Structure formats: C-alpha cells, structure tokens
Amino acid sequence: MLEVNPRTGLTIAEAAEHSGVSVHTLRYYERAGLVITPVERNNAGRRRYRQLDLDWIRICTRLRATGMPIKSIKRYAELVAAGRGNEKERLALMEAHRDEVLAKIADLEENLRLIDHKIDVYRGRLAAGDADTLWAPR
C-alpha cells in the first residue's frame, strides 16, 4: 500500500499509477465534475493528490466498472460534496444502481448457463468420440 505524504501528496502520474487509471482519466474526472473537493495544486500549479482524492477515485472507478453513467456519478459527487442532509437521496441513487447491477448479474448468469451447457455438450461429444456429428453450417 502506497503511503501518501500528507504535506506533498502525489503527482498526477503517481496518482494514476496508484489508482490504476490513466492521467487522461484523472483529468477527465476533474473536468466532468466527479470530484468532491478540488484537487490541490502546488506553487507551480501542478496537481497534488491526497489520500482523500485517491479514495474518491477508487469509488468513481468502481462505480464506472459497474456501469454507472458519468451523469449519475457526478450527481453522487455533488451530493457528497454538499455534505450532510442529503443521505436519503444518496441512498436512493445507490439503491437504484444496485438494482441495475443485480439485473446485469442475472443476465450474465443466464449467459454463463448457456456457455456451461455448450461446454458440457462438447465435452460429452468429444468423450463419446462423435464430436464430428455436431451441427456446423455449410
């Protein structure tokens, strides 16, 4: 685990490497309004990422990986940045997204069942020695 110096923070390249996203993605997240606090800058104007920034990047990338649209992540970031008092709206946003993720998981499980069936058919036919009788378009 990388220790982030609270005084100096990380450069954008270091933050990108640590978080597993590109420098371009970090800049995009900032431009798109997905940050909860502005990324600090040093005297030369270069970004310096703190642990809070890295933790938030991790949340954003996980939400994106589950298919949450940028618009929804931006709304969530706005709610978090606004502070206390909007927890019900944050909860509703997360519950709605959870329902979408569960539906995608159900679809994937159904697709996996088909794949498993096809694997079983091929294994069975190969073991029986009659795989060459399987359907194949001409």
Image (cartoon, rainbow, N blue to C red):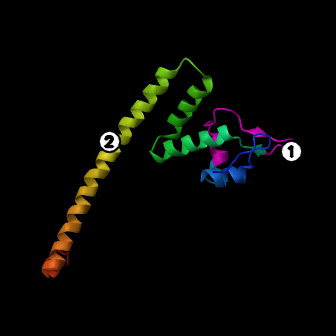
Q: Which residue is mark 2?
A: 103
Expressed as whole percent of the image width and height from the top left, the position of residue 137 reads 20, 75
Expressed as whole percent of the image width and height from the top left, the position of residue 11 reads 75, 49
- Local crowd size for mark 1, using a 10 Å CA cut-off: few (<14), some (14–19), many (≥20): few
Q: Amino acid at mark 2?
A: Ala
The relative height of residue 68 versus residue 90 in the rendered view (above or below) is below
Q: Amino acid at mark 1?
A: Ala
Magenta residues, dominant SS class: loop
Measure the alpha-carbon separation of dots 2 and 1. Answer: 47 Å
Q: Residue furthest top?
A: 85
Residue at point 66%, 52% (across, down): 16
Residues tagged 2 and 1 counted as in contact (Cβ below 8 A) = no
Residue 22: numbered disc: none
Expressed as whole percent of the image width and height from the top left, the position of residue 32 reads 62, 39
Which circle's residue, 2 or 1, is located before the other in the chain?
1
Q: Which residues are magenta?
A: 26-46
Q: Which residue is mark 1?
A: 44
The relative height of residue 97 versus residue 24 in the rendered view (above or below) is above
In front of the other: 27 or 54: 54
The relative height of residue 118 versus residue 137 in the rendered view (above or below) is above
